[in-house]
Image (tube, rainbow, N blue to C red):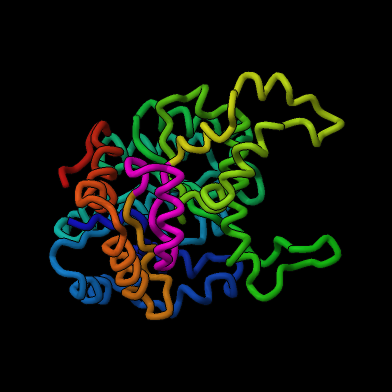
Amino acid sequence: MKIDAFSHIFPRSYFDKMVEIAPDKGAIKRWLHIPVLYDLDARLKMMDEFGKDYQQILTLSLPAIETVAKPDQSPALARLANDGMAEIVKKRPDRFPAFVASIGMNNVPEALKEMKRTIEDMGAIGIQIFTNVNGRPLDDPEFWPIFEKMAEYDLPIWMHPTRGAGFADYATEKKSKYEIWWTFGWPYETSAAMSRMVFSKFFIKLPKLKVITHHLGAMAPYFEGRVGHGWDQLGTRTADEDYGPLLKELGRPINHFKKFYGDTSLSGSQAGIECGLNFFGFDQVVFGADCPFDPEGGPLFIREIIQAINNLKISEADRKKIYEDNIRRLVKNGPKVPKF
């Protein structure tokens, strides 16, 4: 069985509402022209190419709920998305065995209520968050109760990068050009979010916390030396703050980075997957294809990533961990996880 743990969809009712209220129509332009994103029949037909042993765990596509809805609107929009996800799973559990709940991070009290509803009553296997909340870092104390509750549930958080052209690459400019904000900005964004979590001692305070980073840990595996020996010298480059006590408490920062999980969504790069596996190990990588955001509108990344995984010179037991065992293990302790 190949369980694609990081694929994206819009339940149709949610999609129609999101298009209606989105403040920036240009920002959602791409989403309007990928039918398998919001047309369930088109999605099912596309999936047939990969046989009956291919399944998708559903996550909501960008944009983040908090970017299109104000705090008083985001709870209702999250409910609409999650109800739609649950309906799809109920309709076709053979293709979609489970869903990941969506929350509006700009309304934490309501987000906690929605987590309770979806996880305890509807069988959601985790939540999806984004690497910043309208420009605010995830280690902002306001968001702590969300992480605390997910550690209590012993279920994973799916963490997706978010960054737009408004994040300029140079201080003298107002926007990022040539979609640099996406190609290199997203991996940086994920790496920065991971770093803030590590140095804010998330894994010390919440040892049961599980975070699945989209795109296999972003920059951390490739920059293992800088994350390792480089951050072993934390504080030697900083004059206005004493990081000595923090470094003493953390030990080697790289050990905390290796507590994250990652998915194989690297647009088909076998070398990248090998790098991520070398960093995280075979127990902390799950199969994910980032469907449907490829040049073919759905099947290309699935096809290429399956080929890359199948070409890895690894044992069949380790390959099975990536394809299905790891994601099953990550969610098995949830209060109402469906059997898949």
Q: Would residue 38 be seen by someone viewing this image from the given angle? A: no
Q: 287 or 154: which is nearer to us?
A: 287
Q: Identify the magenta region.
A: 261-285
Q: Would residue 89 be seen by someone viewing this image from the given angle? A: yes
Compared across the picture, whether 291 is left or right of 148 comes to left
What is the tally of numbered marks visible in this picture? 0
Compared across the picture, whether 293 is left or right of 43 comes to right
Q: 336 or 218: which is nearer to us?
A: 218
Residue 274 falls inside the magenta stretch: yes
In which quarter of the view is residue 39 placed? bottom left
In which quarter of the view is residue 303 placed? bottom left
Q: Is residue 323 above or below residue 25?
A: above
Q: Residue at x 64, y 65 (%)?
A: 181
Q: Residue at x 24, y 55 (%)?
A: 3
Residue 239 falls inside the magenta stretch: no
> How far from the left and from the top, in percent, is residue 337?
22, 39
> How far from the left and from the top, in percent, is residue 207?
44, 24
> How far from the left and from the top, in percent, is residue 111?
46, 40
Compared across the picture, whether 196 is left or right of 154 comes to right
Farthest residue toward the front?
Answer: 313
Q: Residue at x 36, y 56 (%)?
A: 6
> Which quadrant holds the N terminus?
bottom left
Q: 215 or 159: which is nearer to us?
A: 215
